[in-house]
Amino acid sequence: MTFNLAGKVSALALATALATSLGACATPNLSTGDFTPGTPPAQAAAPEATMASDYVNDVHSYARPAEARVTHVDLDLSADFAAKTLSGKVTLDVTGRPGATQVVLDAKNLDIRSVTDTAGRALPFTLGASDAIKGQPLSITLPAFRGSEAQQVVITYATRPDAAALQWLTPQQTAGGQLPYLFSQGQAILTRTWIPTQDSPGIRQTYTARIVAPANLRAVMSAQDLTPQGEDAANGMKAWRFNLDKPIPPYLIALAVGDIAFEAFDERTGVWAEPSQLEASHKELMPTAEMVGAAEALYGPYQWGRYDLLVLPPSFPFGGMENPMLTFATPTIIAGDRSLVSLVAHELAHSWSGNLVTNATWDDFWLNEGFTSYFENRIMESVYGHDAAVQEQVLAWTGLQEELASLDPADTRLKLELEGRDPDDGMNTIAYDKGAAFLRTIERIAGREKFDAWMRGYFERNAWRPMTTERFLEDIRTHLVKGDAAMESALMMDQWIYQPGLPSNAVAPVSNAFTAVDQAAEAFYVTKGPASAVPWASWNTQQRQHFLSWRPKDGAKTWLSEAQLADLQAALNLNAEGNAEVKFAWLQVALAHRYQPAVQTADDFLSHMGRRKFVLPLFQTLWDQGDWGQPIATRIYAKTRPLYHPVTTTSVDAVVGRP
């Protein structure tokens, strides 16, 4: 998942022609989006079943996997856009220790209608007391397990219109404006609001699905598409079938249904988008194919077959979501100049860190995102060069300093303790940017060659298993440190992981590309020079962001007058800025200074944007302005809240309050 400052590279740096052959996996028919199976790239050995000893207690799940665990999910659901529900059944394959007679699942806000075996015989079940964060335990009594043979449980159920994982969009909320749209977002613990299963990242499950939807819409999932043309179903509907034979954490089971079309980049990569957005999305995201090759060259074969992207409507709450085979992406990355495609590098990197090696619980979220942010930057360096990668590092470092200053010190540790809290509380830039800085520190001290050899081995040794911080430490001490006392002392790993803030061996990245930006920023912000002197037109997106978020080295805040803000806006035409990252940075400055002429720009931006990375900070900035900003925030949120995904509204509600 992309949460932190997404990478921004210059159009010039992205002019490199694609030249790498990525191998064959499936051949798309460019006119229809159909797929013909081809020869897959080299794959690792088939994933082995997770051992009971790999499971750890997950405080955000009711599941007891050491007793009985779900290994496969088979969905048969129909989408009702009028009722805003998915209904049907799920068949779960469950294995258990000999003698066990119960499996416990996670469910939240689901209407459970029946629980049976595959012969239709009723199985006793209970829904326990509801917890605001975890939902309810769904406990099902089974015949005693004998040996390793799985039992199957069939649950007939329906979601509710307010299921937190699902967003049902009206036609007016789409680019086409004619047809409705549905998408899911399962991370962290929202899959239980649309599928009753063991919703813990450490309990990996394969899945199959049959999704029935209106015939004029297309269903896609984070799995192999078995029916590219769909199958006729009753009452003007079509059915779509999917299969993922590699076990994944359940938050990666993902569905979208809408008016979408496909265009390939090469034999195994391509993009889905609404038809009116497809040409621009394809042009913007063309570097995807080269990124896959760069990632494989770094840390080993891509294990998932195809790598496609789905560009969603603007209400999607994240920058991207790393659903296997099909990254869900925000339309805010379609900037027109390929300047924001590091988001693709981030979600692609998750195919190794997160999807292949997964945090066992949300307390270890940094293992997913810190590794991925580091890997993302290495992909960007490989494709676009060292300077572009370092600019990304500097922007992330700046954001990290702000986060460290604003959070409770306990929440600035990499290893968290989230019991009794929503795991979303841990999804901030600490996991991403402190985690990546930690890995860059290891690389610097150990040397890139040794570090890369360890990293590649880390993914191979720990593929398909849940990972904890303690297992990470065991792995790196065994395979990289190897008893070297001097290296162990220099790395300061325990301080990075278990202590707040940054250890003394943290080194701030420095970009020469920002030297001129710093000079221009000091001239404008400190000495109050004219905005016309800012060489804006010659800067890339990162440099523009750095300028707008600039602070003096002593960290002191600089106050701009209304005349200076007007000069800045007029000289740089910021209210008309089309790049979402730059416009967001401008609005943060303008609203923090109570600049009234920017309020309408903020209103328009927040009315057409559901990405939490932008929405939440802007509402927080408005709210922090007291009598000036709070009425503005309340007015805007009253009309925009229905447009946002529950992931976004849950966060903003805590700031603004529910209208």
Image (cartoon, rainbow, N blue to C red):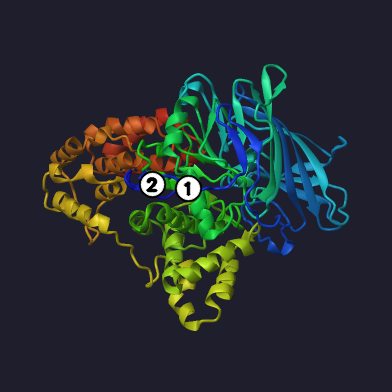
Left or right for 125, reference 642: right
Instruction: Characterize the local packing of mark 2: few (<14), some (14-19) or many (20 or more) Cα atoms within 10 angstroms.
Output: few
Give the camera-side residue of 282 and 353.
282
The reply to whether callout 2 and callout 1 are in contact (CB within 8 Å) is: yes
Q: Position of residue 169 (x, y in %)?
A: 52, 27
* Residue 363 in sight in this render: yes
In the image shown, does 133 or 532 lie closer to the viewer?
532
Identity of the residue drawn at 43% across and 73% down: 445
Q: Where, quadrant-wise, is the C terminus in this rendering?
A: top left
Q: Residue visible at 38% across and 30% down?
A: 607
Amino acid tagged 1: Glu
Residue flagged by tag 2: what amino acid is it?
A: Thr
Secondary structure of the residue carrying numbered label 1: helix
Q: Earlier in the sequence, mark 2 or mark 1?
A: 2
Residue at horizontal 44 percent and vertical 60 percent from the top: 436
Q: Secondary structure at mark 2?
A: loop
Q: Which residue is mark 1?
A: 290
The residue where tag 2 is placed is 16
